[in-house]
Amino acid sequence: MGPKFSDDSVTLGDGTVVDLSDDKFYSPYELFKTGINSQINFNISGANDKLDYFFSVGNNSEEGVLPNTDYDKTTLRFKSGYKVTDNFNINTSIAYTNAGGKRANGGDKSVFSSLTYWSGTFPINDYLNDDGSQRNYTFGIIDNPRYFLEKSPLIDDVNRWVGSINMNWAPKDWINVSYAAQIDNYSDNRNRFMPPELDAGSQVGGFIVNQNINLLALESNLLVTLTKNWSEDFGTTLTLGNQVSDSKRDYSFIRGETLNVPGINDLANTINTFAGKTVTQTRNVGVFGELKLDYKNKLFLTLTGRNDWISTLPKQNRSFFYPSVSLAYDVHDLFAKDSEVFTFGKLRASWAEVGKGPLFGRIGQYFIADGNFPFAGSGGYRASTRLGDLNILPERNRSIEFGADLRFFSNRLRLDYAYYKTRIKNQIFTVGTAYSTGLSGIVRNAGDFETSGHEFLLTADIFKNDNFTWETTLNWSTNEGKVLSLPDDIEALIFANSGFAGVTSEIRDGDKMGSLYGWKWRYENGQRYIGDDGLPRVDFDERQKVGNAFPDFIASIGNRITYKNFGLDFLLEWKKGGDLYTSGIRNSIRNGILKFTEFRDVTTVLEGVKDDGNGGFVTNDQEVEITQDYYRSSTRFNRASEILVQDASWVKLRNIGLSYNITGKILDKLRMDNISLTASANNILIWTPFEGFDPEGNQYSAGSNVYGFTGLSTPITESYSFGIKLGF
């Protein structure tokens, strides 16, 4: 671990004395810098009685908050509409986007995992030796995060085209036929360069990965709408439709290992190369109908039904139907028609079912290329270690919702409330299995779950006249889920495992969704057990529930204030509860980075109980010296979830903005329609007990079932913006 930070010198093994009197603390957060984002947008539009058009071009250029990271996006869009006849018109649009840049690596053995190890004794931005090699106080055991950023960014270049056409025909007053088609095509070229002097590339002499992703997605929508008022009190609207979507994704990669010449990012500069290609295609065909009935414009009933045919399901289960029904009633007249207090009121209730299929390639068992099968150096194809149930059923979500929309004092006070409950049956998961079976997991229907929550929205015009307005919006919501049942042969569903640290995102029968499990210290009679060496013990008998990633509630209060041409907006948010495991915290503990590890090289008595020698327990009175070894011990300290899992509650000033609209004669002189100036700040203040990089971070993508893991990706940034909008 090296000498104490307070020492002025250290004597090496050969007797050399090293002067440390000029040492000082260097914050690892000096790695970050101020990023700059610039946006320029221009649009032009026009119309006459037959034709309308709109064209826009924009550029978003950003220098990241980390060195050697950037992002650039350019977008062009054109759309137009043409009125062919009085009852037939055509609208088209086409958009092109080019985006890409350099990003920091995420995950294990990345910039942020390295940052959790880094000591403040050494300046993090002093990363190069005179010969250009990595300056590293750990002699290569831990990567210098700055060197990592400079030498091994992720580079991507995305080109995307989206085109659409929409035709609308109304042959009769009560008939409307519309057809829309869209094509979405993009190519995504990615490059990752890993030199051999970084940990991730050290075992293979460095490597280069080039990836190419091409997607072609087509969608077709046909709608026929029939509207009929049968009397002054009763009307109906019937919509019949067909939707077809088809997407084809072509993924290929080439990986080269062992660089011939250091620093050259070219596959021709590698000795061993590996390649792979995957083509996936999915198709969904649906027919649907919706019937709306209204009585006296007060009672509204809506019935829907849809049948889908999904290509990723087994043939015998590929077709499934799901309906819905909703009812709404305007209750205002039941109270007082002319009341100045109660302006409007609507109650609503709904029941709906939604079906869902698995991803591509989750049914049956596929064969994949393997360069070392059946013999090393003699390639072939082997069975995948993932098996999909050939009789898998579509996932079903059945939900009910009750709500109210109430308005008072001439709509100056507006209240919207909803309660919902969703039952998820036959949810599709990859369930782990014993490796002795030759499989890593089985895709199957595995569980019955339920989620429920409340949503409350209150908006009030506190003050309102021609010169001054003040509007406040209060939002409050909850979401809670629980496991109703799992198949008898499944003890738990594990979505993520931290590995040696022992924290998992998993659910067991009767659990709440979002449960976190891990190792805890051993406790006796509710008190931490202290062993005969004066130190606690981590209990490895069985993982225990150590937290839940879902918050108790999320609330926000927003305000919009205007005075003449000035405007002020601000939004304050509060997340109560929700636990997070920070992937890098154990690294920081073992290396003595965190402040609480300052408590060392002292003798103390740890709070808890010890054996009394007769099968019972008494208050611990053993003195023990706390050294660096205590924090580095996985059996005594650094795998206890009491320190690895933290409360991630927060209160945040999400944004604050100021605007000014220029009016008057100056616009006439400049021959302009409008000029507005804006300034805003985002994520500038936060209050939280969380000690990681970001209490809002998520190590996994939003589409996954993993919650409660963070710490290995770039945190949300604090940002300030200034803008000007010109209208001609």
Image (cartoon, rainbow, N blue to C red):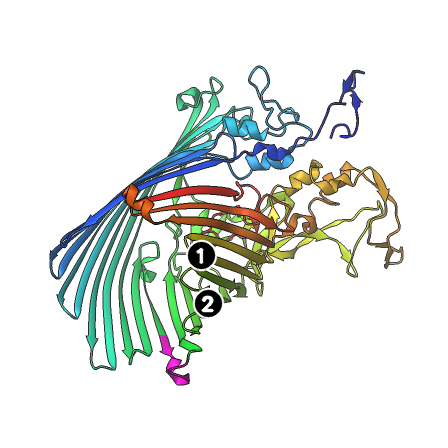
Q: Quarter holding the N terminus? A: top right
In front here: 101 or 685? 685
Seen in the image, is 645 located left or right of residue 697?
Answer: right
Q: Residue at x 59, y 46 (%)?
A: 498
Q: CA distance from mark 1 to mark 2?
A: 41 Å
Q: Residue at x 55, y 41 (%)?
A: 712
Q: Specify start and end residues of the magenta stretch as a single range.
A: 327-339
- Can I make out residue 79 in this image? no
In front here: 679 or 616? 679
Where residue 298 appears, as percent x and y from the top left, is: 33, 79
Give the quadrant of residue 57: top left
User: Crowding at label 2, few (<14), some or many (≥20) Cα neighbours within 10 Å?
Assistant: many
Give yes or no for contact between labels 1 and 2 (Cβ–Cβ under 8 Å): no
Residue 422, numbered label: 2
Q: Which residue is mark 1?
A: 562
Q: Residue furthest left?
A: 85
